Image (spheres, coloured by chain):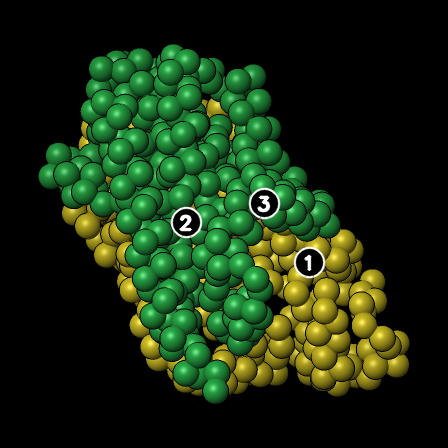
Amino acid sequence: MKAVRALQFRLRRGVWYELRLYFKFIGIAIRSRMQYRADFLFGVVGVLVLNFVNLSLIWIMVARFRALAGWQYWEIVMLYGTFLLSHSVYAVFFWHLSRLEDDILHGRFDQYLVRPCSPLMQFLGREVNYMGVADVVFATSALILAYHNLGLDWSAGQWAFFALAILSGTVIETCIVWIIGALAFWTGRSRAIFFVFLRFQILSQQYPIDIFGMWFRIFITGFIPIAFMNYYPLTILLDKPNALGVYGMGFLSPIVAILLLALGALIWRRGLAGYTSSGN
Amino acid sequence: MKVIYAFIRTAFHNAFIYRIDFWVRLISIFIMMYASYSLWTILYRQVPDAFGMDLETMTTYGVLGMMLVSFVDAASDVSYYIAEQVRLGTLELDLMKPLDFIIHMFYINLGEFVLLLVTNGLPGLLFAYLFLDFNPPVSLQAGLAFLLSLFLGYVVFFGISFLMGMLSIVTLDIRSYSWVFWSVVQFASGQLVPIWMFPPAFAAVVLALPFKDIYFAPMSIYVGAQQGSLAEILLSQVMWAVGLILASWLVWQRVQRRIQVQGG
């Protein structure tokens, strides 16, 4: 293994080379995906129905009780749409990070190490997930509807902040899943933790975190910082008090994203360096 | 009875192999129960005594829904099991067993149901009593009716799930759309939001479907908010349960003929 890694190191040719390869991989992945058109159609319709059902449930509750912890229905739609838009980019390109465990557990990860290109690029370029396309469509429609119903009129600066928040959201979600996945380098399994994460993800997508107790809010702010994906940036854009009562939390979203990216890279490198194949 | 016991034992045996999964499931259930509790508490703080119901009744309903889904949902596994056997082409192994296929499926599934009831439902119940102001059933009679209704709801769910599994024999793959179907079922069963809160026209549609008998029937009996008399609700459940099992049997008879032709 050591010899292979040394060889691999010599053949490495910098970031642009890696990126070009990545896009080539993605092109191949898209072409192979397009072989299954019926699957694509079912998937898209499914995602649309699922999101519609989620929002209907929230509508029933909020309409009957007028608001939820000071959030009107369309504000919650905005919360949901913002999350979904960030999530959709993750879902298209990085969704398979949640299945990193499979490759490590079954020794399939070895194949990435013997090729002259970064293992991460190879892993990421292997798949695209078409379901995310439906997320983009749904999220955009929901956001447009919410924007009009709330009578918002954002300045260019606010739009720029919104775009930055979406981008940060994608990075935050991707990095959390990446870090959880990379834990499998040590433990062999990490999908179980991922499933717990999914619960927090669903909850913070659908509800303003004000409805939860303090320890819960702190948990999804500090430990699994998923609230930075949609909740904190929107409290600024919609001019609302946030659940921690600390002004300007939303501005921290990009910083949280960068910190997570650094942490992810660190853990990934450590994991890769100590990787011993489960096969022989 | 001996056969049922054997299937239950197998289910427990399989479960002990994956101990991490057990803890993860439990943590997930606690999180969802807590979330439901928080949600209704906040909503009721805004409009106290909405729908003529006090806060604790409502949170009990919400928490109960999250607790029940942790084991009643076992019924949906039948469809996945059949779909998987179809995909791998091993369905004939199940046909060779000296048990009627539907009964065989029911036993396997019942084993899982009991397993999840013990490993998820009971800890959930304890958690709810200790931390989430969980009420006991409104009366002894309601408690007994709840248990009966719960089992009937499970049978209804099993029937729906079995029919879904049969669909996989016709269309070969149900995985790409079955998860959407289950989320619609969950919505229309009143497991998350009680049906009395639905807009009237919408509630009328939902009440005409069998899904309400899975969760809404036992849950509304438990909190004493059932729509109609106990006898009416239980009768509706029995009728749907019998109807769906009968439909499953008829479909299975037809499908079986198809399989025999292919087998050669």
| Left or right: A233, with A59 as reference point | right
**Circles 1 and 3 on the same chain:** no
Q: Is disc 3 surrounded by few (<14), some (14 to 19) or many (20+) residues within 10 Å?
A: some
Q: Which residue is mark 1?
A: A182
Query: Chain coloured green: which letter?
Result: B
Whole-number angstrom distance, CA of label 1 to CA of label 3: 42 Å
Residue beneath the point at 88% across and 76% down: A2
Q: Which quadrant holds the N terminus of chain A?
A: bottom right
Q: Which residue is mark 3?
A: B4
Query: Which corner quadrant of the image does residue A245 belong to?
Result: top left
| On screen, residue A261 above or below A66 | below
**Amino acid type at image mark 2:** Phe
Whole-number angstrom distance, CA of label 2 to CA of label 1: 38 Å
Task: Note whether residue A26 is visible.
Answer: yes
**Is disc 1 placed on a helix, strand or loop?**
helix
Image mark count: 3
